[in-house]
Image (cartoon, coloured by chain):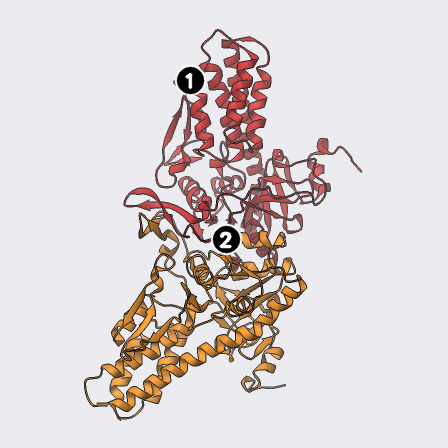
Chain colours: A orange, B red
Amino acid sequence: MKVKGNHFETIWINEENSGLVQIIDQRHLPFAFRIEDIKTAEDMFIAIRDMHLRGAPLIGAAGALGMYLAVLDHPGKSISEGYITEKANFIKSSRPTAVNLSWAVDRVAEDLKGLRPKEEAVELAKRMAMQIMDEERENCLKIGQYGVKLVEELSNRKNNDTVNILTHCNAGWLACIDYGTATAPIYRAHDQGIKVHVWVDETRPRNQGARLTAWELSQHGVPCTVIADNTGGHLMQKGLVDMVIVGSDRASPYGDIVNKIGTYLKALAARDNHIPFYAALPSSTIDWQLGEGALETPIEERDANELRMVEGMINGKVSEVEIIPRDMPAVNFGFDITPARLISGIITERGISLANKKSIFTLFPEKNLNPD
Amino acid sequence: MKVKGNHFETIWINEENSGLVQIIDQRHLPFAFRIEDIKTAEDMFIAIRDMHLRGAPLIGAAGALGMYLAVLDHPGKSISEGYITEKANFIKSSRPTAVNLSWAVDRVAEDLKGLRPKEEAVELAKRMAMQIMDEERENCLKIGQYGVKLVEELSNRKNNDTVNILTHCNAGWLACIDYGTATAPIYRAHDQGIKVHVWVDETRPRNQGARLTAWELSQHGVPCTVIADNTGGHLMQKGLVDMVIVGSDRASPYGDIVNKIGTYLKALAARDNHIPFYAALPSSTIDWQLGEGALETPIEERDANELRMVEGMINGKVSEVEIIPRDMPAVNFGFDITPARLISGIITERGISLANKKSIFTLFPEKNLNPD
């Protein structure tokens, strides 16, 4: 998507120097747009661990490109399986609970199995990393193509008046390679000339909405407004929201989703006000093994300091202030579950399904190991 | 309630110097506990306008005591009606939309009508201000006495295990003279030895929960935990909330309430999880003239900078950081409506009613001008 009028993705191999990977260092957004050079697997390890980049699809791509850099860095003429395993474990340890990271790194490692000439290994690693990026980009593109129809319909129903879409957290292109998941239908609609406006939940405690989603939408020219997380229900009561689109960190084939804490509250408000509520996700987010009601929130009680400390600009410098004293108990849960009964539909790379097993397996029949 | 082990109210006349009013300067909480001397009506004007104190009942009392100081300050031997009117208008202009302020100031002004010896006027003004404070204190005390029964019941049902209560914003003693509204049943339960724990919503964008409610509960020894506003739904899904109690800024005799933005979302989550949701309010909060469905959110789109700027401690100093850039659109609505259908009951100074007209008028029959 666009940044200051130019097209950017979140991660790429430098055009003139194929030994250099570059990323948008997201820690400084929205205050500064900085590109970071990633020259080695060690650089990538730090970028992933310290969250210079985040978002499941992006972390996967970063891991794959980290493997590519590891192979490039190898001093000898041929690459052993031991070296690959060692580097794969190293990169995966940067965020041990990130499923997408392991999956992407292992895909590259698998491809490189067996002793190989370095040159061949470099080509293979690069090709696999590019393929992973292509797949992620393609998934988001398709989600946009299918999802835009929902926006179009609302626009038609409103006689081309602005469609107001509420979103929570950042399921935008900054979390992916391009387009995003929840944002893909929005960018597509905007690019097609449909009038859209996005209500962006601040998304406490890490403020991904205020810091990332609002920034990326604005940079691409999509009108948006940041609101406190408390505000969505009121806006819906007042008729100021036409639809809700969120992403998902994990989903069940029964249509329940895990997403950033607070998503459930917006889904309740959407239902209470008869507003459609959609989750946009690539099918890789669905854990096909899950039985009915088996989706659980990840055990992720995060550091309460994320709630206590708030980062922002002061005197032209990014600094943190303490808003809750250290001796005051505080807890910080990362996710909640939005049950399928509150979800109008799931926007995937194969189309839009209802939030139930039958409809989801109709789109992904090969995943149904026990068809009725 | 207690602060550092000693009993405090939010505003008082100094015991040794009856010409000195003192308040807790709430701007510095929870980082510093400061008592401010209010020596003149002008001091009180500034304290109200610049929110050294806030909360409807407290602002009313402050206005009345401001009138007392104005009378004390009069240089002559007798006080004219013109002087009273001038001072009343001056104090009321400190927060022109605060209904309680006008009401309290006018009560004192009414009492002082006609030319009077200054000494008599001082006595009258003081007596009326004290009476207003007594009434507010008494209302909260009664709300606590009635409301504690709900907590007691839950405690019994849990075999004396901790009752977890969620609250939003600050409807605590810092907003009143003592006890608070939503907090009154909680303090009462705690003081009676019932085990309670409070989930305190941070309450963006002004963070009254994190800054005031958590502080006042902790100072009194009530266990509490600050959470992001996004968290309440998840806690309810997990069975970690036994009841919700909130205050109200305005209520209808049909049982709908206006309260701090985000209250509605918690009410939806409470209903979805079969958790009782109570509003605690003195009957002065009810606008008896309202017809069914006539309650509207006050037109209060507040300064978006309240959302953009966050105040906290940095290097031992209270400072503000900018978390949303100035050029990014943001809106800040102050209130939402929680409809009666989501409210289990209303805790008033005369008892607990259901959130419907019949039940409310049963407690306040004199307010029913058109009985069926």
Secondary structure of the residue carrying tag 1 is loop
Secondary structure of the residue carrying tag 2 is strand
Q: Tell whether B341 sits left or right of B102.
A: right
Q: Depth check: give the residue in front, A88 or B151.
A: A88
Q: Which residue has dot 2 on it?
A: A227
Residue depicted at x 49% and y 77%: A139
Q: Residues within 10 Å of mark 2 (few under 14, many from 20)?
A: many
Whether residue B151 is situated above or below residue B53 in the rendered picture: below
Q: Tell whether B290 sits left or right of B310.
A: right
The lab-note entry on whether marks 1 and 2 share a chain reads no
Q: Which residue has dot 1 on it?
A: B19
Q: Residues within 10 Å of mark 1 (few under 14, many from 20)?
A: some
Q: Which mark is residue A320?
A: none
Q: How far across and how far down the image is residue B42, in percent?
A: 44, 23
Tell how many labels: 2
Between tags 1 and 2, which lies in front?
Answer: 2
Residue A14, quarter of picture: bottom left
Q: Depth check: give the residue in front, B168 or B298.
A: B298
- The disc labelled 1 sits on which kind of residue? Gly
Residue A206, quarter of picture: bottom left
Q: Depth check: give the residue in front, A85 or B163.
A: A85
Whether residue A128 is situated above or below residue B343 in the rendered picture: below
